[in-house]
Amino acid sequence: MFLGKILPNPLPGEQVVYFLRRHRFTFFTKLLEYFLLLSVPLVVAWVFLTYFPEQWESLFGSGLSEVLLKLGASIYYLGVWVFLWTDWVDYYLDVWIVTNERIISVEQKGLFNRFRSELRLSRVEDVSTEVKGFFATILHFGDVTIQTAGMEQNAIFRMVPRPYQVSEGIIKLTNSWRKAHPQEAAQS
């Protein structure tokens, strides 16, 4: 069943309403930073070879210094790729699922740490939206904060697309859940 792959431990009659990830622009900005980091050694080498060829030849003309340069460049590029991969995993595995029964937040913290929280719609008290910055306003992404009753921690969907529609949808889901379950809504 497809729902079982998206939704961990589905409840009877549960349907996915929103399956959210961060907006693509947030990863695109990180990608630009990494491409700049990947181009730095090439630009430095080009500047040295173009404007200071004698110094380049004296520094890296011998066999050992050339090997050390290649080793250093390889370690640098490997480090950049590892950090890029870590950011990609963090972006891709951060998922927020809103169903007609509950809200599930799955957040990746580094490569080997994952945090999963679940919030029943009966516990939702308030939903707020924050869109901050020029690109967030133009591209329609922002944070959705779901405040809960009691001691539970608030759920925050960070940098999700269409935050106003998501928050309105969660409010509608909460209201329809309370109408469908009046006894349980009165207890919570």
Image: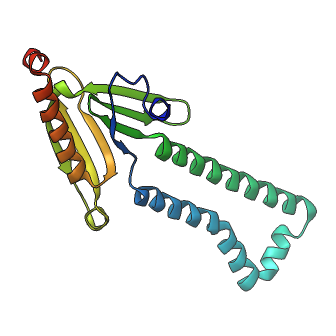
Say whether residue 131 is left or right of residue 65.
Answer: left
* Quadrant that contains the C terminus: top left
The extreme left residue here reads: 186
Q: 63 left or right of 6?
A: right
Does 67 sit above or below residue 22? Answer: below
33 left or right of 57?
Answer: left
Q: Residue at x 65, y 74 (%)?
A: 43
The x and y percentages for residue 11 are 35, 22
Q: Whole-percent x and y of residue 60?
A: 83, 68
Percent position (x, y) of residue 76?
Answer: 68, 54
Observer-nearest of 20 and 12:
12
Q: Residue at x 56, y 66 (%)?
A: 36
- The tally of labels here is 0
Residue at the (33%, 34%) spot, across then down: 15
The structure's colour scheme is rainbow
Q: Residue furthest right?
A: 63
Quarter of the figure with residue 161: bottom left
Residue at 51% across, 64% down:
32
Taking 43 as reference, is 116 left or right? left
Residue furthest to the bottom in view is: 51
> Where does the image place residue 87, in percent across and percent down from the top left?
52, 47
